[in-house]
Image (tube, rainbow, N blue to C red):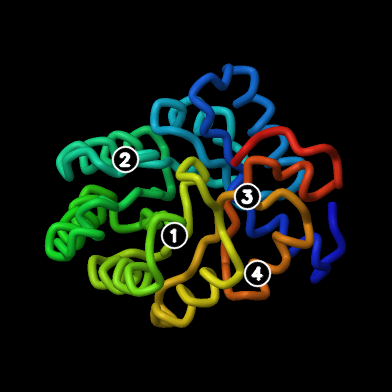
Amino acid sequence: MYKENSDAARVAGAIDHTQLKPDALTAQFDQLCDEAVKYGFYSVCVNSSRVKYVAEKLKDEKTLICSVVGFPLGAMTSESKAFETAEAVKNGADEIDMVINIGALKSGDYDFVEKDIRAVREAASGKTILKVIIETSMLTDDEKIKACELSEKAGADFVKTSTGFGGGGATVEDVKLMRKTVSDKVLVKASGGIRDFETALAMLEAGASRLGIGSSIAVMTGAPVDGNY
């Protein structure tokens, strides 16, 4: 749809087209899949209960399937997150976006946080990409740095800014900090509050490799924003 090497193609190819609303209807997931194929988005991102449905819808397409795990609070047991991860992968997820235990991190229980992430890493198949959501809006800069370090140590492929449900979203400053903190082996995903093309492009310029966006069509076309992710 977009000229090769254009900014539009760059943004579209980085988008995890997202539908995580608890009241989303089946028809909205049909639309999500159709839009992802039409615009050339990297993946669709859904709650784990919808993975099997969208995987079947997209079985003949290049679009990947991303499932959130422990979403949006991250406060359930590591065993629960690991089970949800295994189920999502079995049902067709190519990527897992897990939420850390924010309270444990802020309490300084770093061993618990690392083991929590590692439990998800081990529950996913070796080919499955793991993104770790650190919920930046709830953390100090020092806590953001520590969360990124623990994520990399536990085997994460990405660190991700936000759930979009925690009272704040991605900022250019946080993306830069996260990119600076992790090694070149780990990528950064910006998510939450990206509602226009200029913001999306700014996140990529700041160092993000992937964008979690619910208002992807508005971002790509300038249409009115529909959604809060």
Coordinates of residue 167 in the picture (x, y in percent): 50, 45
Measuring 19% from the left and 53% from the top, which residue is drawn there? Answer: 116
- Mark 1 and mark 2 lie on one chain; the one further toward the N terminus is 2
Quote the CA–CA distance across marks 3 and 1.
Answer: 13 Å
Quote the CA–CA distance across marks 4 and 2.
Answer: 26 Å
Q: Can residue 129 be seen here? A: no
Q: Which mark is residue 70?
A: 2
Left or right of residue 201: residue 85: left
Amino acid on which disc 4 is placed: Leu
- Mark 2 and mark 3 lie on one chain; the one further toward the N terminus is 2
Quote the CA–CA distance across marks 4 and 3.
Answer: 14 Å
Coordinates of residue 175 in the picture (x, y in percent): 54, 70
- CB atoms at circles 4 and 3 under 8 Å apart? no
Q: Is residue 101 above or below residue 8?
A: above
Amino acid on which disc 1 is placed: Thr
Measuring 40% from the left and 49% from the top, which residue is drawn there? Answer: 97
Residue with the mark numbered 4: 204
Coordinates of residue 229 in the picture (x, y in percent): 59, 41
Q: Which quadrant of the view contains residue 128? A: bottom left
Q: Secondary structure at mark 1?
A: helix
- CB atoms at circles 4 and 2 under 8 Å apart? no
Front position among marks 1 and 2:
1
- Mark 1 and mark 4 lie on one chain; the one further toward the N terminus is 1
Q: Residues within 10 Å of mark 4 (few under 14, many from 20)?
A: many
Quote the CA–CA distance across marks 1 and 4.
Answer: 17 Å
Q: Secondary structure at mark 2?
A: loop
Q: Residues within 10 Å of mark 2 (few under 14, many from 20)?
A: many
Residue with the mark numbered 3: 193
Quote the CA–CA distance across marks 1 and 2.
Answer: 16 Å
Residue with the mark numbered 1: 136
Q: Secondary structure at mark 4?
A: helix
Front position among marks 1 and 4:
1
